[in-house]
Amino acid sequence: MRWSVETRLPLMIHCRKAQNELVKILRKYEKDLPGGVFHCFTGNQIEARELLTFERFVLGIGGVLTFKKSHLPDDLPAAVPLDRIVLETDCPYMAPVPHRGQRNEPAFVAHVLQRLAEAYGVSPEEIDRQTTANVRRVFPSVAV
């Protein structure tokens, strides 16, 4: 986190089963961090709301959104505005339906985009526009 503050580069954070500890550490740097992505978010509405208190961070949403038993299609629209989401693949893991069980690849993110559009009741074009704008905001030096 200190490196992120010093370099002004955003963080990519993958946290499994340690959100309370993560939040405690992030609070120490909250005002100075440039932002970033909570990678591979699979939490619930309460966890999403807590992470989104870090205003310069977004949630990374991938293939889990498309899984049959995923709660994300219900929880995300209830707790997360579209301007706080980026799409991701987690390649080579967690391929979305209909490729579940296969090696994931970047082209499969289109399935995540489609499922997110269905969950939010908006067009795939709106998801594309908004999530691309979100990436540009979080990673201003990256061409998208």
Image (cartoon, helix red, strand yellow):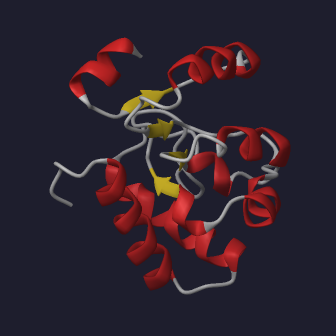
The foreground one among 76 and 134 is 134
The C terminus lies in which quarter of the figure? bottom left
Answer above or below: position of 67 versus 32.
below
Horizontal side of residue 8 vs 117, given as left or right: left
Question: What residue is drawn where x is 78% and y is 50%?
Answer: 70
From the top left corner, tell me how far across and down residue 119 is, in percent: 71, 72
From the top left corner, tell me how far across and down residue 102 is, in percent: 48, 40
In the image as oriented, which residue stretches furthest toward the front?
31
From the top left corner, tell me how far across and down residue 57 is, in percent: 50, 44
Query: Tag count in the figure?
Result: 0
Answer above or below: position of 108 versus 59.
below
From the top left corner, tell me how far across and down residue 55 is, in percent: 55, 47
Question: What residue is drawn where x is 54% and y is 86%?
Answer: 123
Horizontal side of residue 55 vs 64, given as left or right: left
The N terminus lies in which quarter of the figure? top left
Question: What residue is drawn where x is 59% and y is 40%?
Answer: 54
Answer above or below: position of 127 versus 90.
below
Horizontal side of residue 66 vs 9, given as left or right: right
